[in-house]
Image (spheres, rainbow, N blue to C red):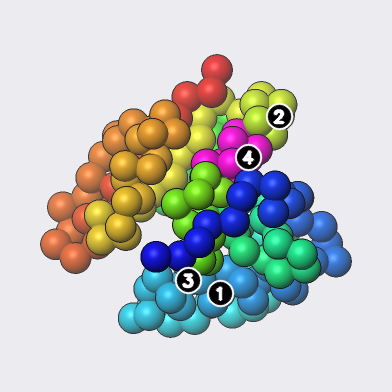
Amino acid sequence: MHHQPPISHWIISSVTSDSIEEIVDFVNNARQQMFPELCAQLNDDVSRWVRSGHFLTARRGKKIIATIGYVPYDHRFPQLRYQGVEVVEVVRLFVLPDYRRCGLAAALFGKLKEQARELKIEFLYLHTHPFLPGAIRFWEKCGFAIVDVEKDPIWKTTHMQLRLT
């Protein structure tokens, strides 16, 4: 069992242009850990994606220990109907294993949600998968509701949303 650091031992802040490269590396490493069977994304693609949205990091000292962000929702899932509303897609919540189960993910999401509310975002959308331990339950605890589950036998992509207004 890991000793969990107290809440005061991390600092949550917005990603700035001078830390994009570091964030891209962290996000790519996290993706590789969660989905080793998928091809790596190109750093330039991830960098453009990070710049298009709003990302937060949690650090302990200078070390990144967690990330979360949102990007403009791109309407790539036809079964979801978000035309005419302000919606963003919550992406890349990843907490290093030694810092899990101590409230960090919830703290990161809370800050992200505050910022979305300030920008008058109406809906937060995300998708996750049942094979990611605890993911669906975590998002439900954060107030998200399941709006669709794809029938794909492997991914079973679970689409969720949270209305902010």
Front of the two marks 2 and 3: 3
* Disc 1: CA contacts within 10 A as few (<14), some (14-19) or many (>=20): some
Residue 118 in the image, given as x and y percentages of width and height: 71, 26
Residue 161 in the image, given as x and y percentages of width and height: 41, 34
Inspect the image, locate mark 2, and give the three-letter code of the amino acid beneath it.
Answer: Leu
Residue plotted at (71% across, 62% down): 60
Q: Which mark is residue 74?
A: none
Label 4's element?
helix
Residue receiving disc 2: 119
Residue situated in front as seen by the camera: 151 or 66: 66
Inspect the image, locate mark 3, and give the three-letter code of the amino acid beneath it.
Answer: Arg
Front of the two marks 2 and 1: 1
Residue situated in front as seen by the camera: 86 or 145: 145
Residue 140 higher or lower than 118, as above or below: below
* Main secondary-structure element of the magenta-colored stretch: helix
Inspect the image, locate mark 1, and give the three-letter code of the amino acid beneath it.
Answer: Asn
Residue receiving disc 1: 28
Inspect the image, locate mark 4, and give the three-letter code of the amino acid beneath it.
Answer: Leu
Residue receiving disc 4: 112
Label 3's element?
helix
Residue plotted at (71% across, 69% down): 63
Q: Which residues are magenta?
A: 106-113
Farthest residue to the top: give it: 165
Residue receiving disc 3: 31
User: Where does the N terminus fall, quadrant-wise?
Assistant: bottom left
Q: Earlier in the sequence, mark 4 or mark 1?
A: 1
